[in-house]
Image (tube, rainbow, N blue to C red):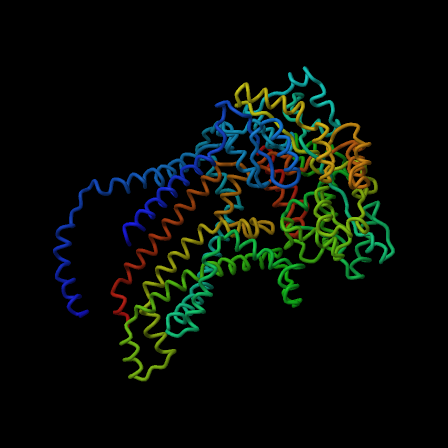
Amino acid sequence: MTPGTRRTTRFAAGLAALLIFTTACGTSGPSGASGGKPTAWALTGGDEQVFRTSFGTAGIDGQFFGNDAYKQKIRSAVGAGQAPTLVYSWGNGGMLKSWVAAGKIMDLTPEVAKDPALTGRFLPAVAKSGVIDGKTYAVPNNSMQPVFLYYNKDLFTRIGAQPPKTWDELMALVPKFTAAGIAPFSLGGQSKWPQLMWEEYLVDRIGGPGVFGAVAANKPGAWSDPAILDANRKIQQLVDAGGFVKGFSSISTDSNADTALLYTGKAAMYLMGSWAFPTIKEADPDFAAKQLGYTTFPAVSDGKGNPADIVGNPANYWSVSAGASDAQKQAAVQYLRTGVMSDTYVDALLAGGSVPPVNGIEAKLAKARDPQYLSYVYGLARNAPNFQLSWDQAVSTGQADALLDNLDQVFLKQITPEQFSANMNATIGK
Amino acid sequence: MTLVRERTAVRREPRAAARGATPHPMMIAPALLFFAIFALLPLGGVVVLSLMKWDGIADPAWTGLGNWSAALADPATYHAIGLSLRVMVVSWLFQTPVSLLLGVLTAGRGRYRAVLGVLYFLPLLLSSAAIAIAFKALLDPNFGMSRAFGIAALAQDWLGDPTLALYVVIFVIGWQFMPFHTLLYQAGVRQIPAQLYEAAQLDGAGPVRQFFHITLPQLRYTILTSSTLMLVGSLTYFDLVFVLTGGGPGDATRFLPLDMYLNGFSNNDMGRASTLAVLLVVAGLALSLGLARFARFSRGSQQEGA
């Protein structure tokens, strides 16, 4: 090695050390309460661009993460007092509740009293998910994501049937589709959470929203409710009948393989949240325009639940970190008032195919790019007596994992509905 | 020429040893310090945490042995331990013969062997997450390899059938780690003196007898090293399984390390996760100590076995 190359090597090593040092500083997160610009962490994809634009205008320092990475990172950050000023959440479920209980989240009730429009401009069913024990802790920041039944119109025409209005009709459709070599339902079972939507809807249709209300309130034995047992029996009957595409528990939602089954004509129906629409539209615009149909989850005869009830994510929410400096808090509240859901913000959401939970935007919807679909989603949420937050978000974080695991075993027929209830009852209070 | 150099090396050795026999104790201070800060301290922290109830946000509270009795009363813990043991045994049975044979194959001379060697080595260069994502796509029953090759038999419920999924995971783990063990065996085989084979040939031993009577005994220590790495390593398989199945279907691939992670970072039960972590540490230590003792038991020069 000549002296010249040695010097370059040493320089390069020094540079590398410096880079490691600076990147290490970069990933150590925002400096808690040290003042400066307000910060925010949000999710990549979806409405990311809308956030970026509004952050730019409001002078907020935004960082973006993948869904699972965010959920784990935000937890340690909040616990360590290193939370960003604006904390992104799924409403009053387990995550937000535990942060509020630990005193990490600012109470926005006085701000709402000063300016009722802060929450008053949102659809009540959605705004209510930002409230815990009568106090406002979170404000919606993006679109509503109700879950409903997508279907392939052509396949229904081929077998000469109509989309199911009741559970009995749904069961009757299964043999017709399988006889024609078509899978009745697509399902990404490997990701576990898509199966939860079946449970949520069936329990609501059979027993009404009170059944899950008891679970969320940690009532002893709440998981043994007859509605939950009946729902799990119905799920296993549907599995037995071959209702779900063969090998469904190998199919992962991350790669959109389940969505692809619908638009490639392999499966007739698909129970999924409104976020699947942009995916379908991007993958096959022609299918989305002509063959894609959507309808509500069927009613169950003698069920107590209102067939207009929906499940899904009412929206995502911003909360303000209690550990932020006063200047940061003020700037964040100001942003929630004027930055979030401003006219341009709403327009940008609509242009991306998302429906913001804001009152009185029917006229805007009619002018947007997919008026029919957007109005359908808006109407669904506006007319819903109950908009149930996804259970895995609503139960305590200690229960969510057990819930997904046990439900997966119900779908795999490894456990009976009775075992499911017993296993889940054991997690109450965790 | 080589002879001369060898002789000088031999003559210099005792002097070098005498000079360096007692390095100043201070010389180990930096290493000890690092070990204490990055290994002992966190380990102690985990032991303390295993006696506490902590959700990662609120203040930790003492529960004494509460986490331990809960973990030891929970069938899920035994299920995870059982799975880890099964993975350990099955992946040893799967990886050892294959990488041993591959190692022997690539140790020989010849260009095709070098090319094959490079190909076998490739999986070692990929990150676990990338491997898992690639296999997940390949194993998709509708859009995976069954479609790519047009063979319907490949459209199995690979990751969705609880018994099949476990073996698929073991296969993918093997696919990732066999190159490394192949490399170990390749190096081991190359160190076997050629005279042994020449003598065997003169005695009329064929390739199969040579393999069983020279190669295998000569590789005793390599097998032990590779097995130790494999067995202790199977206590830490996490990244690949986490991305590939997430522990599912149901809990069919929820191995002990994954169970620990999910308890800690998905259930937010840091106390319970720490309990499982301590179990893992104890199991890993016992395993490697046991294997080291076993190695001492069968002490002797590698070449004596011939």
Quadrant assignment, res A362: top right
Nearest the eye: B99 or B10: B10
- What residue is shown at x 60% (from left), y 32% (from top)? A88
> How far from the left and from the top, in percent, is residue B287?
37, 53
> How far from the left and from the top, in percent, is residue B192?
30, 70
Answer above or below: position of B216 versus A98: below
Q: Quadrant of the C terminus of chain B?
A: bottom left
- What residue is shown at x 69% (from left), y 52% (from top)? A258
- What residue is shown at x 45% (from left), y 40% (from top)? B275
> How far from the left and from the top, in percent, is residue B229?
39, 56
Residue B243 located left or right of residue A159: left
Q: Is residue A113 visible?
A: yes
Answer above or below: position of A70 versus A58: below
Nearest the eye: A21 or A103: A21
Residue B235 located left or right of residue B144: left
Answer above or below: position of B291 versus A78: below
Q: Is residue A219 visible?
A: no
Q: How many labels sit on residues?
A: 0
> How far from the left and from the top, in percent, is residue A152?
79, 52
Nearest the eye: B71 or B185: B185
Furthest residue to the right? A160
- What residue is shown at x 60% (from left), y 40% (from top)? A44
Furthest residue to the top? A114
Q: Quadrant of the N terminus of chain B?
A: bottom left
Nearest the eye: B41 or A72: A72
